[in-house]
Amino acid sequence: MKLKALKPRLHNIVFHTHTVSGIVISFALFIIFYAGAVALFMEELYPWENPEARFEAPPPTDVDYDRILTIIQNENPNFDTSYRFSLVPPKKTDPFVHLYGYQKTTDGTSERFEAQIHPITYKIHTTGEPKTHMARTLYELHFFHQIPVAGLYISGFVAFFFLFAIITGVLTHWKNIITKFYAFTVKGKWKQIWTNGHVSLGFIALPFQIIYAVTGALLGLSILLLAPSAFLMFDGDTNEIIKAVRPDAGITYDKNAKVIEGQVSLNSIYSELTETYPNKEVTLLYSTNFGKEDGTVNARIDDLTGIAGDGIFVYSYKTGELLQAVQPDDKSYSEGAYGVLIKLHYATYGGLFLKIIYFILAMITCYIIISGVMIWRTARDNKRYTEAQRRFHHRVTKVYLAITLSMFPALALIFIANKIVPLAVADRIVYVNTIFFLGWLSLSIAGLYWNNYRALNRNYILIGGVLGLLIPVANGLVTGDWIWITLVNQQYYIFCVDMTWLIIGISSLLFCFSYSKLKDETKNQSSSDKEKKNTKSKTHVKPPTPVLQNFVKN
Amino acid sequence: MPANPKHLSSNSQRIVKITAGILGGYLVTILFHNSIGSLLSEKAGLLITSAYSSFFLWSILLIVPFLFKNGWKAWATYIIIILICAGIIFINK
């Protein structure tokens, strides 16, 4: 079935905007999707990442939260409860209780304070920076947090241009979108193979990509929307805007309110909520102006399985009555919509299985981005372009492939770095991050010397595969939790990480082995012309890209 | 097959169209949503809706200038819409 074609002028214009916007954002978009796909499992990776967190969490209802607060206040007299603080109850993936708040400094100002508390012994485990940061580094890379100030906005604009590229892409391929959907073939010319993959996989992942383009743009660029609205609709009162999104944030507090003895405790609120909502868990306890007349004690609950399963409850510190609430599963449109957008982005509404689907779709998207660049180059690799132009296209593609494909071995590298830098080392996060970013940089630079795409692809898969196999070994050597031990002890989060890397490592090496056989037939192909000739004669063998490979493996 | 260059615009026109799409499109998006908001007494729902509808509208408005043969006409169209929306906001202030 063919759909009605766009008029030639419209088609050419839209096609061109799709190409240009796609090429411009492709580098950044690939990094966002690749790092973001791993960051989906940020919590699940935590027990693997931090060996000190490998003990079984007590039921969060058994934890005495008021006692934790008292302990922190006794141990650290500068800790200031009166401004704002929050407590994260223990989870299966992270058994520590986390406390975030502020402490007074000697010069009268306040600074951030955080601590991890053991949920059984109530000892303060660490204060200040956490010891491990691996998944968080990847999470932050996914919105370019490492770039000061501008990072978040860059990622927001990339997401916005991604939406533009999606719309123009659908228009460009409109005529053939249905027929290409069934064209799951790896036969034909290379140009055809890339195009078929680009269009059919793009069509499958379309809803997923629209979700990410819109929610990503929102998370990055919300300031662009909210600032003018605050000015135009609410006479510059930003509080009104925040209130629309989160009702509890609209409450104003008086810094100098009277200090009183309150009627509520953290424990009473915790148990009240867990009794009322037995199927949901309290994900955060937080308080503003604790110990003062207008103070509130708040809680967020979530079942992490429903798209509207989260709720916010605000209690008065003075009387203990419920001041405001966003009831889970029973919200008005304006109360619920923002939360839905956030949940759609973080994949926290369908359990682990949904995250795996998200991961696969993210890897498909990575493939679509790569194939888009390959279409761009292959379509320009002919006599209508001058030698200089074609060399330029080749160089851009090579730089692009070197940066993106080297993310696979670099990813394996940060897992290893996380284990080989001892936990006792001060500032170890800096060392781990340096190994990751310098490793990625050197791998990319090395890639520029492999002048042919096949060699580039194979070498990265080989390096990534070898490093991947070292990950379970490094974990076993450093922590003693070898893969068979974690299986027997039913520490499935740790076991799954090691097992996944084992499978990725072995299949990468198998792939390289079958690849080297192939190489004998396609020897000596460095220039793009020669490569073209070769691919013409070898079109029946299509080596999967590492991205696609990863997705098949996972 | 890359796009046929005979349908594409010159460099200066391209800049005009891109600025019309990004800057003009942004202003139209914001003022359009806020002009509706200025007509409503309960604005929370609109504010939440604009969190996603803005990006759809803005990206479509980024495509539209490329359909014009003359990019300045795209700018002119956007400025007219901007003035109308600003007028609505001003009257309801």
Image (cartoon, helix red, strand yellow):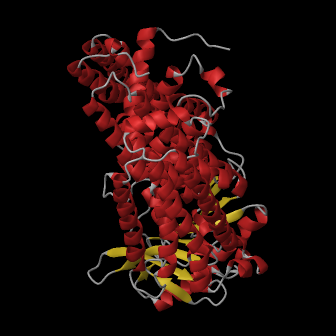
Q: Where is residue A505 in the image (x, y as percent from the top left)?
A: 60, 64
Q: Where is residue A314 in the image (x, y as percent from the top left)?
A: 59, 60
- Of residues B72 and A172, the one nearer the viewer is A172
Residue B55 visible from this viewpoint: no
Asked which quadrant contains residue B17, the reply is: top left
- Of residues A194 and A35, the one nearer the viewer is A194
Q: Which residue sits at x=66%, y=60%?
A: A301
Residue A29 visible from this viewpoint: yes
Q: In which quarter of the image is the C terminus of chain A?
A: bottom right
Q: Which residue sits at x=51%, y=36%?
A: A535
Is A513 rendered above or below residue A172?
Answer: below
Q: Is residue A320 left or right of residue A289?
A: right
- Of residues A358 and A291, the one nearer the viewer is A358
Q: Which residue sits at x=72%, y=71%?
A: A492
Is A236 rendered above or below residue A412?
Answer: above
Q: Quadrant of the N terminus of chain A?
A: top right
Q: In this view, does A88 lie to the left or right of A490?
A: left
